[in-house]
Image (cartoon, helix red, strand yellow):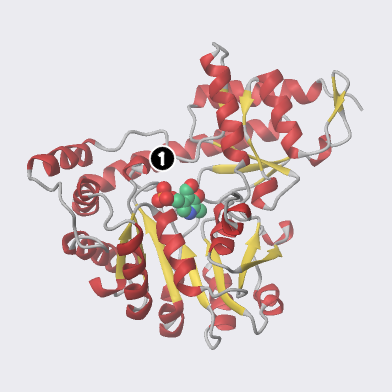
């Protein structure tokens, strides 16, 4: 007996493969510098930890409504109004087990068999798999480095066919760190506003932008808001990756469909984490935590870019999130101890084996010439890691 065709179509995660190898090396006593983290290296702030504790003793240990508690949904609506200038009621919100779960709901609620979903490339590796699981077909649109790896209105227009049902916009972007300007978003909105195309706007990194401003996509007109499923969550903003709370804001029809889907797949998201998220969003301490985290990421970003530049390692300047893409194209065809490098995947393995640096090769992000380096790492590790990277590439022979 075989597994279903549906799960057979899912690609294995190269990210997990690298992380597993790095962890094994660490367990064997090797001093590995990890640039592979996809999460802030901060603890969840104390006031949120206390709320989690409090929830247990308040008896919040039972099922909640499938789409989340009213209190948390109200706090999400207030956040969207206060920080993003968006007006939604609780009927537009579904709280899920992480933004990834919200994305899964969104793909399943919008796509039919054979529908096309436009995905600017590079992209976060989960999107194509969720599109395929929902029966859709990812339509990759390569973005250009001269445009900062951002899809243009013309590129979007040319990718639309009568089968297009969905467009996924990840802003700020994982892995490129691209952040769209107001003008760029406006021009994308003008292409989409009269089309029967849903938009998933994944804005999970909205708070982590450097020297620029983040604009939320549903703010670009009522027609756009009506078609957009806005995705956000607690993971990156409040260092709550393990708590698994994300949410969507969308029109009431889609929201009710996603809520019903979720009720059968998982029932509700964790009751304790929902209370902690409610406190995270409404507590005054949140601003201070975020400011500290952002200041730390700002100086780490400056440090890693300075070191990469000094070592003459090519990179794409990131404006948001906590990743920097490094080009390994210049090393293709070169050798290390007789072994020739012909892919980012191979380079990443050789770098890990020989220099003890864990990175993420970007083949499964649609960027086969790049590695993704996460600077959710200490300044000391950034210094050691980039130095070891530079020493490694010096040893490559033509
Ligand atoms: N969207 C993007 C672009 C991400 O990078 C991630 C996590 O890495 C997520 C969504 C998922 O976040 P969550 O932990 O809320 O599922």
User: Does 5 sit left or right of 55 as displayed?
Assistant: right
Residue occupying the point 52% across, 84% down:
193
Comparing 134 with 200, the one in front is 134
Q: Position of residue 94 (x, y in %)?
A: 31, 65
Q: Position of residue 311 (x, y in %)?
A: 72, 29
Is 63 located above or below residue 86 in the figure?
Answer: above
Q: What element carries label 1?
A: helix
Residue 385 sits in quarter: top right
Residue occupying the point 64% across, 50% down:
365
Is 182 located above or below residue 96 in the figure?
Answer: below
Residue occupying the point 47% across, 68% down:
108
Q: Where is residue 10 in the image (x, y as percent from the top left)?
A: 60, 53
Comparing 145 with 196, the one in front is 196
Residue 145 sits in quarter: bottom right
Is 35 located above or below residue 4 in the figure?
Answer: above
- Badge 1, how many Cα within 10 Å: few under 14, some, many 20+? few
Residue 211 in view of the camera? no
Give the farthest residue toward the left: 58
User: Does 340 sit left or right of 253 as displayed?
Assistant: right
Comparing 4 with 330, the one in front is 4
Q: Where is residue 396 in the image (x, y as percent from the top left)?
A: 84, 24
Give the farthest residue toward the bottom: 194
Is 114 located above or below residue 40 in the figure?
Answer: below
Residue 91 in view of the camera? yes
User: Does 243 sit left or right of 23 as displayed?
Assistant: left
Pointer 1: what residue? 295
Residue occupying the point 36% across, 78% down:
251
């Amino acid at each position: 007996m075989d597994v279903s065709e549906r799960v057979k179509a899912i690609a294995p995660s190269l990210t997990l493969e690298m992380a597993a190898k790095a962890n094994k090396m660490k367990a064997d006593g090797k001093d590995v510098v990890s640039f592979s983290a996809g999460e802030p290296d901060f603890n969840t702030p104390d006031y949120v930890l206390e709320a989690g504790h409090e929830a247990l003793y308040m008896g919040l240990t039972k099922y909640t409504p499938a789409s989340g508690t009213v209190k948390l949904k109200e706090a999400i609506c207030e956040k969207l109004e206060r920080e993003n200038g968006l007006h939604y009621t609780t009927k537009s919100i579904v709280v899920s087990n992480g933004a990834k779960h919200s994305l899964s709901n969104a793909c399943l609620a919008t796509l039919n068999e054979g529908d096309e979903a436009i995905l600017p490339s590079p992209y976060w590796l989960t999107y194509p798999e969720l599109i395929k699981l929902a029966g859709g077909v990812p339509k990759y649109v390569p973005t250009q480095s001269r445009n900062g790896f951002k899809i243009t209105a013309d590129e979007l227009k040319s990718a639309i066919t009568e089968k297009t049902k969905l467009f996924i916009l990840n802003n700020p972007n994982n892995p490129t760190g691209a952040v769209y300007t107001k003008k760029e978003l406006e021009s994308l909105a003008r292409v989409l506003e009269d089309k029967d195309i849903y938009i998933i706007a994944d804005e999970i990194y909205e708070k982590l932008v450097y020297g620029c401003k983040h604009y939320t996509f549903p703010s670009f007109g009522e027609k756009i808001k009506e078609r957009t499923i806005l995705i956000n969550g607690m993971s990156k903003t409040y260092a709550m990756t393990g708590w698994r709370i994300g949410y969507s804001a969308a029109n009431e029809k889609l929201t009710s469909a996603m809520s019903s889907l979720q009720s059968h797949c998982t029932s509700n998201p964790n009751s304790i984490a929902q209370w902690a998220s409610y406190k995270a969003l409404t507590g005054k301490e949140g601003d201070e935590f975020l400011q500290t985290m952002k200041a730390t990421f700002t100086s780490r970003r400056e440090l890693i870019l300075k070191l990469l530049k000094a070592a003459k390692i090519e990179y794409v300047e990131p404006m948001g999130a906590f990743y920097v893409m490094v080009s390994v194209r210049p090393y293709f065809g070169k050798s290390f101890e007789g072994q020739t490098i012909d892919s980012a995947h191979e380079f990443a393995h050789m770098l890990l084996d020989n220099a003890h640096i864990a990175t993420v090769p970007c083949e499964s992000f649609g960027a086969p010439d790049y590695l993704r380096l996460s600077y959710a790492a200490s300044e000391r590790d950034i210094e050691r890691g980039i130095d070891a990277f530079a020493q490694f590439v010096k040893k490559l022979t033509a």
